[in-house]
Amino acid sequence: MPSTTHFTHLKTDAIVLRKRMLPSQDALFSLFTRDQGKVVAYARGVKKVTSRRLAHLQTGNYIEVILQVRADQAYIAQTSLYSGFSQLKAAPMALDALYRGLFCIDRLIPEGQSEEALFDHALRMASQLSLPQATHQTLLYDFLETLLTKLGYRDQQTSKAYLYQTIEELTNEKLPVGII
């Protein structure tokens, strides 16, 4: 009897948190989705010259993605770009703040836990970082404070140094500094 493979399709908005290129033509992406929270998904053939998805799947991009889910593994089927935050990516301080925020989301939010309010907050932070008068470090600090509070890791305001120390203890990694 032939085996049947069942796919579930999910169309959602996502922020690309991280990409890991694999030795093959494939890559593994961490996405922060509006509906499913953090999702780790494969993109098959994304490194081929003919693939249009790789341009959409740059870290920090806001995209619409169609995921195929089979046997608890997600695969990126299609993407379309909402925003690449090109103004933000042209400003090194803003880009550094964005990448630190994305690092924290990737390391602190468990897979499959819907965090729609945090998703909206992350989009607001990226949009505000794009503004010329943005205070990058303040926006990052406010975002990280909200992230830790919503995830239940803190309930009071503290200094920036203590906030960063808390993140480093939770992730068991140093918070990236001067990524650019």
Image (cartoon, helix red, strand yellow):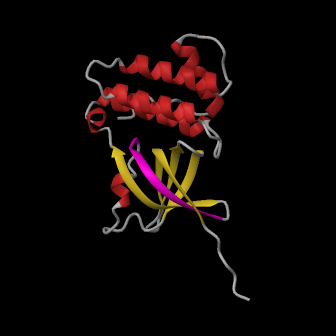
Image quadrant assignment for residue 51: bottom left
Residue at the image point whose x is 35% and y is 26% from the top: 129
> Would you say 159 lies left or right of 137 here?
right
The number of callouts visible is 0
Side of 17 where 40 appears, left or right: right
In the displayed structure image, the side of residue 48 where residue 156 appears, left or right:
right
| Residue shown at the point (54%, 35%) measured from the top left | 105
Q: Is residue 80 above or below residue 121?
A: below
Q: Position of residue 116 (x, y in %)?
A: 56, 36
Q: Position of residue 30 (x, y in %)?
A: 52, 48
Is residue 63 one of those drawn in magenta? Answer: yes
Q: Nearer the viewer, residue 114 or 154?
A: 114
Relative height, residue 53 to residue 61 (above, below): below
> Considering the image in quadrants, where does the C terminus appear?
top left
Residue at 58% over, 38% down: 107
Q: Quadrant of the N terminus?
A: bottom right
- Residue 138 horizontal/vertical position (percent): 42, 16
Give the quarter of the image for residue 41.
bottom right
Q: Which residues are magenta?
A: 60-70
Q: Main secondary structure of the magenta part?
A: strand
Residue 99 position in % (x across, y down): 42, 35
